[in-house]
Image: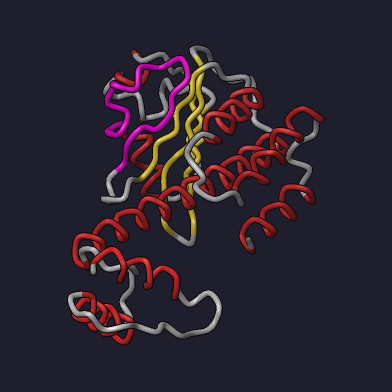
Amino acid sequence: IEDITVFVDHAYSNETANDNEDFDKFENILARLTEPRNTLGPLDEILDLAMRSTHHDLGLVISQNISGSYEIVTAKNLDPKQPWLTESIIVKAINSKEPILLQNIIGSGFDSKKSIVASGFLSIFCWPLVVQGTTLGVLVTGSQKPHSGINDDLKKRLQSYSHLAAMVLNFHLREMRLKEEVKSMRAQQGDMPFLTENLALKEVCELGRKIANSDLAVLVQGETGVGKEVLSLWLHKTS
């Protein structure tokens, strides 16, 4: 929430969304970031905003996955099966954490393999998606013709879109890691009613497992919200 608040202040103070339609989309995506179980869906909308601002007709978003490698999560008017992850311009943007804005890729030094040109790019903007010093991905827009010009307002817009996309990826990766952690804990703890690393609670569950096989009556006491009902239902189920 603190990251989002800082981002909103930055976006508003720098007037990154000048027209009302873009501003409304921008604000809507921010509001949805606080919703539980956020997905990668907003990245399509962010990519659309970036392509509209740059007047580019090609775009893709590359994201880190929970294993630490990178993959393409969305693409516009491009074949995602192309070897984008090995393109030197994208690799440099990821490693340097600095944006690369090329109005004409020919003669830039990045056209040596010609593959990115053959894929349709003649102008290309690569903006790394960085959270707390870690590059989570890269936002890429491009066109089949040279770009007419880059001004400060466009740079501010792209920077704001990259901040927003980085937040989406950050929330997504946190959720994916949490799901993996829960899956691992369930595999380790079997049918225990709670997912916990607390030794005292684990001891309570082990004691409950032993009592469930007996004819003893059980009184479960505790403050509201500590899990009395969950424990009672589990004891009933396993007895």
Tell me the magenta residue range: 70-87
Q: Is residue 123 visible?
A: no
Q: Residue at x 44, y 50 (%)?
A: 97
Task: Indicate the position of residue 64 as horizontal and vertical percent values.
Answer: 35, 45
Q: Residue at x 36, y 29 (%)?
A: 110
In the displayed structure, would residue 92 be above or below residue 151? below
Would you say 207 lies left or right of 150 here?
left
Q: Is residue 19 left or right of residue 26?
A: right
Q: Quadrant of residue 154?
A: top right
Q: Please say if 190 is above or below 221.
A: above
Q: Is residue 93 visible?
A: yes
**Is 205 rendered above or below residue 99?**
below
Residue that appears at 51% across and 45% down? 38
Q: Is residue 218 left or right of residue 162?
A: left
User: In terms of depth relative to the viewer, which is nearer, 50 or 156?
Assistant: 50
Q: Position of residue 237 (x, y in %)?
A: 28, 63
